[in-house]
Structure formats: C-alpha cells, structure tokens
Amino acid sequence: MDAVKTIPKADLQVNIGGLPLRNPVMTASGTFGYGREFENLVNLHRLGGIVVKGISIQPRPGNPPPRIVETSSGMLNAIGLENVGIERFLTEKVPYLKTLRTKVVVNILGDSLDEYAYLAEKLSGHEGIHALEVNISCPNVKKGGVAFGVDPEMAKAVTAAVKTATDLPVMIKLSPNVTDIASMAQAVEQGGADSVSLINTLIGMGIDTSSRRPKLANVIGGLSGPAIKPVALRMVWQVAQAVSIPIVGIGGIETAEDAIEFLLAGATAIQVGTANFYDPQATEKIITGLHQYLYEQKEICVRSIIGTIRLGSST
Amino acid sequence: MPNFQEKALVQAHEQLAPDIFRLTVHSPQIAQASAPGQFVMIKSSNTSDPLLRRPFSIHDVTSGGMLHLLYKVIGKGTRCLQNLSPGEQTDLIGPLGHGFQFSVQEPACLLGGGMGIAPLLYLAKSLQNVSSPRQDHQILLGARTSVELAPLVDDFQQLGYTVQAATDDGSLGHHGFVSELLEEVLPSVRTVYVCGPHPLMAAIARQCQAADVPCQVSLETHMACGLGACLGCTIYAPDKSYRHVCKHGPVFDANEVLWTL
Ligand SMILES: Cc1cc2nc3c(=O)[nH]c(=O)nc-3n(C[C@H](O)[C@H](O)[C@H](O)COP(=O)(O)OP(=O)(O)OC[C@H]3O[C@@H](n4cnc5c(N)ncnc54)[C@H](O)[C@@H]3O)c2cc1C
Ligand SMILES: Cc1cc2nc3c(=O)[nH]c(=O)nc-3n(C[C@H](O)[C@H](O)[C@H](O)COP(=O)(O)O)c2cc1C
Ligand code: FES
C-alpha cells in the first residue's frame, strides 16, 4: 500500500456525455442509498459520482418480505423500488447531497412516458443534481419498467421524452433481460441519450426445498454481484461496438481489476453495486488501483485505455 | 449515529457447545460506541462465496476494547466463522441499528430463547449500572438442551443474577418453552426484553400486551448491508407499512410490529 502512495497520480477525469467526473468510479443505484448511509465508511468526496436510489413521483412502499437472498457469489433482490418519492427526495436528501464534492446522478423510474418526463423536469435546475439515470429495466415491479426496457421503440420513446423535459445529461440504464442488447443501445442513442449504463440485474429465482416455497416473496428477483460480471462485461463490449455515446459499465465490479476489464471493453466509467454492501471501501480501493494500473502500464491518463482490448492472436 | 469499519484481531474463540461459539475480537472503536441490542456485520470469509456479511448481536463488551459475539453454526457463513483462530483478522462494521431502551421501567424481565440470549448478556450488564438491585430483574433463558444452555446461564449467574432456565428436553430447569415461565413473573416486572425465534417473540408480545406490560423485541431478517441502503430487511408494522430492521430496529416496541398476517 505504501508503494501506491508514492506513485505519480494519473489523470482519471472522464466525461459521460456532458457529465464531467473526477474519476470513473460511481456507485450504482439502490446499493448506496442516498449517499449519507455510507458517510462514516467511505470518503464520499473522493468518488467520481453517486447514483442514488431510484425515485418515482409518489413514494413507493416496495415488495413484501423476504426481499433478498444470497446466492453463490451473488444475491437476488426484489426490493420493488421502495423509495421516498420526488418531493421528500428534494426536501430531505438533496440538501445533504449538494454538500458533497462529487457528482450526483438521480435514477428515475415511472409507469408512463409522462411520469418520466415529469420527473426529469422536476429534477432539473437544482444545485446538487448533475445528471439523470433512467431506469427502464427494473424487473421487480409488475407494472412499469419492464415494457420500456425490452422494446426498442418504447426505450427510444422514453429517452426522447426525458431528453425533451430536461437539460441535464441523460444516461439510459439498460436491462440485460433482452436477446439483443446492442439494438437496445442503438435505439436509445437514436432517442437522444447522452450515455448508456449497463447492466441492471438479471432476472432469477430461488426455491427453499424444505418448504417448497420461493425464497423471495415476489418469487422472482434481480441477480447481482460477482456472479453476473462476465455477462455484464460481454454486454458492455457488444454495446461498445454498436454505439458512439459513452458507456457506463455495471455488474459485479468489486476490484480495480474488474473495473479495468470494463474500461478495456469500452466503458468510459463504471458503477459499483452489490460490493458496497460487503466491502464499503470497494470504490476507494478501485480508485487507488486505477492509479497503480495506469502507472504500471505507463499510461498517464485513464481515457487512453478505454476500449483498448486487444483482439486477435497475440504475436 | 457513528459506525465504523474495523479490522479486528481475534483474541479468543471458545466452543461452548457442539455448534455454539463465542468469538472475542479486539475492536475498540465499535466496542466503545456500542449499546446493548445493537449489532455488527461481519465478513465471514475473504472469498466471494459466501458473499455478504452476516449480522450478529453484540453479546458483550469488556475492557480493552473487546467485543464478544455468540453464535450458532447453521450454514455457510457461520461455518466459515468457526474456522477463525486467535491472531487472525476479521472485518466488522458496527455498531448498527437501535438497541434496547433501558432507562424506562424497572424491574425488568430479560427473556431469551436460543441465540436470542446473545444480546441479553450485554443488556443485563448495562442494567446493573442504571437500575434497582439486580435480584429484582428476572432472567428467563431457554434452549433445546442443557448442553447448549448451561454455559449461558453461567454468564448471567456470574453477574449475580438468578436465572430461570427452560429446555425442550427438560435436561435443565423447566421442561418446556421459556415462554411458559413468563406468566408467573409478569405481575412483578414493568418491562420485558425479549430476543429469540420469531414464534417465541410473537407469543411473548401477546402475553405482554394482554398484561399491559411494555415489551421490547429484537428481530432478525436477512440483511445485505445493515446500513439502511439495500432496503432488504423489511418487516410489517401493524398498519402493514414496512419497517427496516437494520435501521428502525433491530429492537422494536412489540406494538410496532405486525405479528400475524
Ligand atoms: C440483528 C441480528 C442479530 C443476530 N444476532 C445473532 C447472534 O447473536 N447469534 C447468532 O447465532 N445469530 C444471530 N443472528 C442470526 C445470524 O445472522 C444468522 O444465523 C447467520 O446470518 C446465518 O448465516 P449462515 O451463512 O451460517 O446461514 P445460511 O442459512 O447459509 O445463510 C444464508 C443467508 O441467510 C441469512 N440468514 C440465515 N439465517 C438468518 C437469520 N436467522 N437472521 C438473519 N439472516 C439469516 C444469512 O445472513 C445469509 O445471507 C442475528 C441476525 C440479525 C438480523
Ligand atoms: C438491493 C438492490 C437494489 C437496487 N435498486 C436499483 C434501483 O432502484 N434502480 C436501478 O436502476 N437499479 C437498481 N439496482 C441495480 C444496480 O444498480 C446494478 O445495476 C446491479 O445490481 C448490477 O450491479 P452489481 O452486480 O455491481 O450490483 C439494485 C440492485 C440491488 C442489489
Ligand atoms: S440490511 Fe440493508 S437496509 Fe437493512
């Protein structure tokens, strides 16, 4: 660790479609609360960005318990998008968030184009809110979400609706529960997205064999954690071939090496999700590890490694 | 409320019964900030399986920044914990949640079933500092057998308390449920603190409500973070709204909990 301190600091700044970050390390929606939950455990000012828990117009109570279950190297969740709603978010959460020297991205969700547009407009023009991430993919809620995320036309329409309603940079968060992720990314790019983030959770389930009951009250839920990393990485790589807007990689990232894999595959930044739960220091360790890697690779700037995966035979 | 992530060295790891262990770690920051009924999240392995931290009540805090946990081996995570040896490092986050409110009404009854006994030792110790003569407090402890219960009964006796025990097989104390011991002591106590299996707590909550005695329960749910971030640890309040055990609890007033659906 001492060696890390003495290496020269690399330039970690990136720009995600109009959202400048001091480094490419963000926290993923739903895994970092509204930031403050981690204030004693993480130096929040050091992060590139914080993506807060998904916000809807009305507060949502979420799904019945049990909502989470551990799986091999991962977890399933069916939280059901519990959140405080936009009014309480603005009055109770934003005052704290704006004291942070990090970029704050607000994740939004809705049941209709109008709801997305309303949220986007309401969240614009506030000190302390720097960008929007649009959740078009949550698998947990029976209505809403799902339809937008799996149909290219709908995804494009939501993107356009949000873009029209706000001047903030708009990041569209893609669902992995589709057969062709690249065409979804192209659709939202055409809709005017400034960037895409991926992946959201993969739909899964678990059954308790002694009671023969599903392990989640909602029966199905979203799989996250290290178990999903190879799938996420593959999708980021495919999307990188298909679009020219910046990509934010998400899925099972816990170490600097994981993060670097995503950058090499074509992501401009990354989000850390489930790892925050078991290793709150994960984001800070990744930032430190990025400096170390760039130094070892004789690079002075993180931007010069993005998408530099070497394909073909090594000669 | 301050919480800390601490790398804590294992000081001692005692086996009390076939599947029951007491882990003592040097965790001065967490120990110093903790109150009875709060818990820690411990990383049980350095690998990604098991992935999540495991919640455990703070069993005791002793001088020199020592934090004690009492746990039963039941699955993957606790099997990993079992392998920790003195001198090895663990990784803890805590103290977490809201503990027992113990400045209120005396004398009290502390009722624990199985590993629910864990937080009650720390509570019993703390009550001594604030309250009426310790004989007035009632300690009722239950477990499956004497092998599991006897070492825990001992701990309370060493503090000077009289303990009433109950075992499922009758090998120690009353033959039956620990809840059956409550009826008799209920008229003489003014608060009941209970931690144990959910059906036990539900039964005690009903008894206390009928007798109009305030009752505090310490609940367990699956937890991913313990920090109020994942929103995974929900229970129902009587109006069917949700509460998060790691943040609003783990100790609740029994009237704030919906016991049956
Ligand atoms: C606030 C709180 C305090 C606790 N205090 C103690 C204590 O002092 N002593 C003790 O022995 N046990 C205690 N428990 C229960 C303890 O957390 C579980 O026994 C432990 O997580 C089991 O992990 P495992 O991997 O061995 O079991 P597995 O069954 O393999 O675990 C699988 C998953 O289920 C979760 N899980 C299983 N049982 C429980 C449970 N009863 N409560 C919560 N999560 C569970 C695990 O955390 C894990 O995520 C407490 C639980 C909570 C919520
Ligand atoms: C408990 C939990 C809650 C989540 N809530 C949201 C949410 O509200 N909105 C959203 O877009 N994604 C949500 N996600 C998905 C994550 O942001 C992330 O896309 C996913 O977990 C994959 O990353 P990971 O493997 O690093 O966790 C949630 C994930 C978890 C585990
Ligand atoms: S355990 Fe994550 S919010 Fe309670």
Image (cartoon, coloured by chain):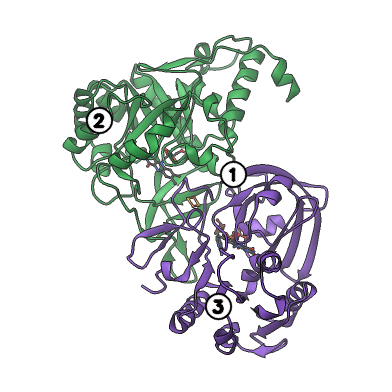
Chain colours: A green, B purple
Quarter of image, res B259: bottom left
For the residue marked with disc 3, what is the amino acid? Arg
Q: Residue furthest left?
A: A114
Q: Is residue A171 left or right of B186 when viewed as pictured? A: left
State the image coordinates of residue A122 (x, y, percent, origin top left): 24, 31
Chain letter of the residue beneath label 3 in the structure image:
B
State the image coordinates of residue B247 (x, y, percent, origin top left): 49, 53
State the image coordinates of residue A18 (x, y, percent, origin top left): 35, 16
Q: Are marks 3 and 1 on the same chain?
A: yes
In whole angstroms, how far apart are the C-alphas of marks 2 and 3?
53 Å
Give the mark toward the camera: 2 or 3. Answer: 3
Asked whether residue B72 is in view, the answer is no
**Residue ID at (59%, 44%):** B2
Quadrant including the C terminus of chain B = bottom left
Asked whether residue B28 is in view, the answer is yes
Q: Are marks 2 and 1 on the same chain?
A: no
The residue that mark 3 highlights is B190
Q: Residues within 10 Å of mark 1 (few under 14, many from 20)?
A: few
State the image coordinates of residue A73 (x, y, percent, origin top left): 56, 46
Disc nearer the start of the sequence (3/1): 1
The residue that mark 2 highlights is A120
Residue B2, numbered circle: 1
Q: Is residue A263 above or below residue A95?
A: above
